């Protein structure tokens, strides 16, 4: 089996795993999954099941959350596949030997050509700048990339995938209906390390009855941001909008912080399933 075949097998098997997990969740459409996630496009979710490219962990995590699976359970499998792909990555082709330098021209001739050489060098520099700019553009059009300065002055790319124009989540459970949208500190906002950020969501009762007081539970957290794990949600009348917030202590280093929150009733059951999860994600930038 060639190295290329091994990479294809690993990528396709992982894509099949994601497809199977989606079927276990009732085969929601990719648009429904994107709405549940609120921070990734349906096209990116669909691409993860095609087996052409190995998905990033950020994509895999949102895929699992949209299917109501615990990302922590599958992190090890993703890392195992990623290690296999790194180990079987094709070696770079050897660089060709440098061509012999032509004999030096007379000094006077070199002086006459120096302006031309300077212009040529300027053009080459400009072209290299254009190539570098293109190379640094994110492959995923839905991804926001920030080059953050880490210890030692080195740059690290921190990526936040967000669907442009996301207006929140909507769900209905019996007579209850809910619409959630971002409030203060919106998705993919850039924040400073080791600072306190107050994140809020606007929660609107679109149902026919008054909600009893409930609790907002944190169901997952990655990236090292710290917060309480529960926030009270007051009783909400039909047509009323309330603002629910949580204080977050950002990570000390550049990273993507993500948390998923879910409204639960007094018995601990999700009040609106997973369709109305509240998403918190910050780009911690030094």
Image: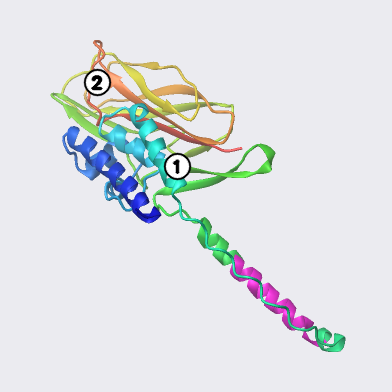
- Nearer to us in this view, 193 or 115: 115
Sequence-wise, the earlier of marks 1 and 2 is 1
- Find the residue positioned furthest to the front: 1
Q: Residue 121: name its quadrant.
A: bottom right
Residue 250 to residue 98: above or below: above
Residue 168 in sight in this render: no
> Left of 285 or right of it: where is 239?
left
> Left of 282 or right of it: where is 64?
left
Q: Residue at x 19, y 39 (%)?
A: 28
Which residue is the site of mark 2?
270
Q: Residue at x 68, y 42 (%)?
A: 153
- The image shows residue 21 at horizontal and vertical percentages of 23, 35
- Nearer to us in this view, 191 or 160: 160
- Looking at the rendering, in which quadrant would you find the C terminus? top right
- Nearer to us in this view, 26 or 187: 26
Which residue is the site of mark 1?
160
Look at the image and say whether residue 118 sits in the magenta stretch: yes
Give the residues drawn in magenta, as a range: 112-128
Residue 213 to residue 100: above or below: above
Residue 152 in sight in this render: yes
Q: Give the overall secondary structure of the magenta segment.
A: helix
Residue 104 to residue 180: above or below: below
- The image shows residue 135 at horizontal and vertical percentages of 52, 59
- The image shows residue 199 at horizontal and vertical percentages of 45, 28
Q: Mark 2 packing: few (<14 Cα in 10 Å), some, or many (20+)?
A: some
> Left of 99 or right of it: where is 140?
left
Instruction: Tell me the CA gap for discs 1 and 2.
Output: 27 Å
In this picture the colour scheme is rainbow
- Find the residue positioned furthest to the top: 267
Look at the image and say whether residue 143 sits in the magenta stretch: no
- The image shows residue 19 at horizontal and vertical percentages of 23, 41
């Amino acid at each position: 089996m060639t190295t290329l075949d091994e990479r294809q097998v690993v990528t396709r098997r992982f894509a099949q795993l994601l497809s199977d997990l989606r079927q276990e969740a009732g085969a929601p459409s990719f648009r429904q999954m994107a709405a549940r996630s609120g921070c990734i496009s349906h096209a990116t979710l669909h691409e993860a099941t095609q087996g052409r490219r190995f998905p990033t962990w950020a994509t895999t995590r949102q895929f699992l959350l949209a299917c109501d699976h615990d990302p922590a359970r599958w992190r090890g499998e993703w890392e195992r596949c990623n290690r296999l792909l790194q180990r079987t990555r094709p070696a770079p082709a050897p660089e060709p030997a440098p061509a012999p330098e032509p004999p030096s021209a007379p000094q006077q001739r070199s002086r006459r050509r120096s302006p031309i050489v300077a212009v040529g060098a300027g053009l080459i520099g400009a072209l290299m700048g254009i190539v570098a700019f293109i190379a640094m553009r994110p492959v995923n059009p839905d991804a926001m990339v920030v080059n953050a300065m880490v210890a030692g002055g080195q740059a690290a790319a921190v990526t936040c995938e967000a669907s442009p124009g996301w207006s929140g989540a909507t769900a209905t459970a019996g007579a209850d209906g809910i619409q959630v949208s971002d409030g203060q500190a919106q998705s993919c906002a850039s924040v400073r390390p080791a600072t306190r950020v107050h994140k809020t969501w606007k929660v609107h009762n679109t149902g026919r009855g008054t909600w009893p007081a409930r609790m907002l539970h944190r169901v997952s957290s990655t990236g090292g941001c710290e917060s309480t794990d529960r926030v009270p949600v007051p009783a909400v009348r039909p047509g009323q909008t309330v603002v629910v917030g949580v204080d977050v202590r950002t990570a000390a280093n550049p990273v993507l912080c993500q948390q998923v929150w879910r409204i639960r009733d007094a018995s601990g059951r999700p009040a609106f399933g997973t369709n109305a999860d509240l998403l918190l994600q910050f780009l911690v930038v030094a």
